[in-house]
Image (cartoon, rainbow, N blue to C red):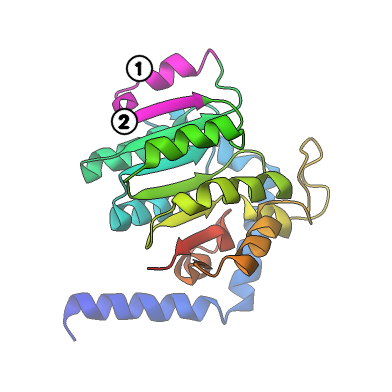
């Protein structure tokens, strides 16, 4: 076994060991639950724009984009723009591709800073509900003939995520991913999101479980679910089978 193969084998064995370590898993869950209560994920920026994401999941997204090399990344949820700028910068490094960012309210103080950003050349913003038939039709048209990766990170209720999966799941290319953010909601203590319409029993994870039950062309990528430990996505790394 050459050194590169040996390194990869050791990594595989480490990751597999995590699944058999309840103490490590428990500590990881306890830490991320506390971090969520303290709004830890609101503390970071990417290329000058606030990015409300877990850095662990951003590293995972980088791995996926590098391996998939999509022509198009579709993202629901824009907020301050850090996430779409991040995706655009990954495509810049890959050397091709565009990001479509969809949000029901792209605020006036954020839009110009996103569009004028040096990564704005790889971005198209669409204002409207991600499940509005007109928005869905527009995105489907823009996705024709392209290798597509999807990131769902807007309204986290079960009903809304299911509608997004129905709308954008079919666009995901074989071997690519639909990444459903914030499945962690299901694993948080009840009442952790008092000012939000989602809750334990009604969130992205419940939607993912229902979706997978009727869509055998998708599977949770256990590689990411097992190794990240403090992920907010967990079972939401959905890979479309080749």
Q: Which residue is mark 1?
A: 116
* Picture coordinates of residue 183, whole percent (x, y): 64, 55
Q: Secondary structure at mark 2?
A: helix
Viewer-side label of 1, 2: 2
Residue at point 50%, 61% (across, down): 238
Above or below, comparing residue 241 to residue 17 in the picture: above
**Magenta region, residue range:** 108-126
Residue 2 in percent (x, y) is at 16, 82
* Tally of numbered tags: 2
Number of other residues with Cα within 10 Å of mark 1, as a class: few under 14, some 14 to 19, many 20 or more:
few
Residue 51 is at least partly visible in this image:
no
User: Which quarter of the picture shows residue 201?
Assistant: bottom right
Position of residue 211 relative to residue 71, above or below, is below
Residue 189 on image: x %, y %? 79, 55
Q: Residue at left 72%, top 57%? A: 186
Residue at the extreme bottom = 1
Q: Quadrant of the N terminus?
A: bottom left
x, y percent for residue 81: 47, 28
Residue that badge 2 annotates: 122
Characterize the local packing of mark 2: few (<14), some (14-19) or many (20 or more) Cα atoms within 10 angstroms. Answer: many
Task: Determine contact: label 1, label 2, CB under 8 Å.
Answer: no
Q: Nearer the viewer, residue 167 or 53?
A: 167
Who is closer to the viewer here, 152 or 143? 143
């Amino acid at each position: 076994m050459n050194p590169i193969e040996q390194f990869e084998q050791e990594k595989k064995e480490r990751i597999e060991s995590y699944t058999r370590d309840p103490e490590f898993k428990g500590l990881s869950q306890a830490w991320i639950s506390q971090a969520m209560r303290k709004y830890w994920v609101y503390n970071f920026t990417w290329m000058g724009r606030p990015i409300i994401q877990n850095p662990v999941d951003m590293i995972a997204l980088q791995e996926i984009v590098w391996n998939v090399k999509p022509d198009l990344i579709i993202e629901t949820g824009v907020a301050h723009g850090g996430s779409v700028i991040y995706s655009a910068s990954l495509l810049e490094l890959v050397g091709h591709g565009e990001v479509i960012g969809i949000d029901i309210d792209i605020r006036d103080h954020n839009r110009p800073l996103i569009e004028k950003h040096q990564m704005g050349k790889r971005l198209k913003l669409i204002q409207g509900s991600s499940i509005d038939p007109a928005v869905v039709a527009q995105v489907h048209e823009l996705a024709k003939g392209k290798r597509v990766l999807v990131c769902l990170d807007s309204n986290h209720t079960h009903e809304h995520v299911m509608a997004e999966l129905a709308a954008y799941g079919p666009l995901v290319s074989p071997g690519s991913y639909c990444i459903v953010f914030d499945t962690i909601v299901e694993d948080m203590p009840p009442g952790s999101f008092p000012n939000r319409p989602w809750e334990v029993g009604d969130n992205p994870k419940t939607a993912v479980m229902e979706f997978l039950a009727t869509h055998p062309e998708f599977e949770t990528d256990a590689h990411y679910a097992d190794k990240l430990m403090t992920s907010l996505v967990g079972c939401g790394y959905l890979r479309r089978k080749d």
